[in-house]
């Protein structure tokens, strides 16, 4: 069982930066692949980024590639999402998710086993 708590969201102007954090409970955090997803108002939750259990490999949605960076610190049971050059279309609730590391990178909501409660990110134009 893994419990996830996101933090770091807020209101930022377009072009600004934010760093989201996701703190995980449980001694098995380092064995899970982690992902970030987001949900804009009126839209389905979509994949943003994922990182392997070791941190050696990452994958990004095309819409955030080059602007967002996912990383993890297994000693701190924490995964991060550094976001720069934010755009109004990045607005939404951002969720952290964990999954058992079966197979390669996964981008579907259904592929993840545990979810946080989400943190709101609002980018004003």
Image: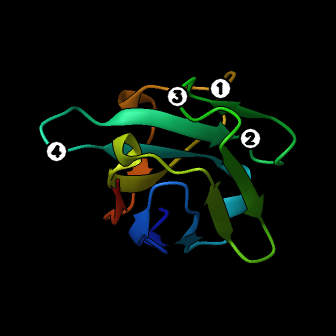
From the top left corner, tell me how far across and down residue 47 is, in percent: 45, 33
Query: Which of the marked residues, 3 or 1, is nearer the chain's N terminus?
Result: 3
Q: Could you say where residue 58 lies in the image, as x and y percent from the top left?
A: 74, 36
Specify the farthest residue to the right.
56
Identify the residue shown where x is 39% and y is 54%.
Answer: 94
Residue 70 vertical position relative to residue 108 in the rendered view, above or below: below
Mark on residue 52?
2
First in sequence, mark 4 or 3: give its number.
Answer: 4
Left-right relation of 21 to 74: left
- Can you tell which of label 3 and label 1 is closer to the viewer? 3
Q: Residues within 10 Å of mark 4 (few under 14, many from 20)?
A: few
Residue shown at 74%/55% (left/top)?
71
Residue 63 numbered tag: 3
Give SS at disc 4.
Answer: loop
Mark 1 vs 4, N-terminal side:
4
Are dots 3 and 2 in contact, CB under 8 Å? no
First reached walking from the N terminus: tag 4 or tag 2: 4
The circle drawn on residue 105 is: 1
The residue pinned by badge 4 equals 41
- Between 33 and 26, the one nearer to me in the picture: 33
Against 38, residue 9 (above or below) is: below
Which is closer to the viewer, label 3 or label 2?
3
Circles 1 and 2 in contact, beta carbons < 8 Å: yes
- Mark 3 → mark 1, Cα distance in angstroms: 17 Å
* Of pointers 3 and 2, the one earlier in the residue sequence: 2
């Amino acid at each position: 069982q893994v419990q996830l708590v996101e933090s770091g969201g807020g209101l930022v102007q377009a072009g600004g930066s934010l760093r989201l954090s996701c703190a995980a409970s449980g001694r098995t955090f380092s064995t899970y692949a982690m992902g970030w997803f987001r949900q804009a108002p009126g839209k389905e939750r979509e994949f943003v980024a994922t990182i392997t259990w070791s941190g050696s490999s990452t994958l990004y949605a095309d819409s955030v590639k080059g602007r967002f960076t996912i990383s993890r610190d297994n000693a701190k049971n924490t995964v991060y999402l550094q976001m720069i050059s934010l755009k109004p279309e990045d607005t939404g609730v951002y969720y952290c998710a964990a999954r058992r590391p079966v197979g390669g990178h996964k981008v579907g909501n259904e592929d993840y086993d545990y979810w946080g409660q989400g943190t709101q990110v609002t980018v004003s134009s």
